[in-house]
Image: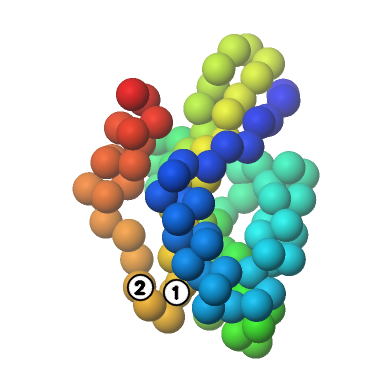
Amino acid sequence: MNYKIEATEKFKKELKRLGKKYRSMKEDYAQLLASLEEYPTQGADLGGGVRKVRMAITSKGKGKSGGARVITLTVLVTATDTDLWLLTIYDKSERESISDQEIQELREQIEE
């Protein structure tokens, strides 16, 4: 199956904000993309094709458990092609979790 990784505007905005806070974010993001290309179904399954992936922030020095969380959505386009959407990213130290309502709103933005 072929996976194409795309990012929402909210994801890009949050990534930029975190990039200003943590110097290693650019390299950490590149590692995440490489990891998702190799294993796109990683992370905790939240149902409906949504997953929560742990991402280490090297400059924090706390590993994956204290790093960032990336919410992804897998959308089947054709029998052989799939889009993997990066819905949002947040720092675990700033926010404990993401609500089902917020995930639903992000999903609706993609479907438009």
The crowd level at tag 1 (other Cα within 10 Å; few <14, some 14-19, many 20+) is some
For the question of whether residue 112 can be seen, the reply is: yes
Quarter occupied by residue 82: top right
Q: Is residue 33 above or below residue 28?
A: above
- Which residue: 35% across, 73% down? 95
- C-alpha span from label 2 to label 1: 5 Å
- Which residue: 73% across, 57% down? 30
Quarter occupied by residue 19: bottom right
Q: Is residue 75 above or below residue 13?
A: above
Quadrant the N terminus occupies: top right
Q: Are marks 2 and 1 in contact (CB under 8 Å)?
A: yes
Q: Which residue ends up furthest to the top in the rendered image?
A: 79
On the rendered structure, is 52 left or right of 81? left
Which amino acid lies under the numbered mark 2 shown in the image of this protein? Arg
- Which residue: 34% across, 42% down? 106
For the question of whether residue 72 can be seen, the reply is: no
On the rendered structure, is 85 left or right of 95? right
**Residue underneath mark 1:** 92
Q: Secondary structure at mark 2?
A: loop
Which amino acid lies under the numbered mark 1 shown in the image of this protein? Lys
**Residue underneath mark 2:** 95
The spot of residue 33 in percent (x, y) is: 70, 50
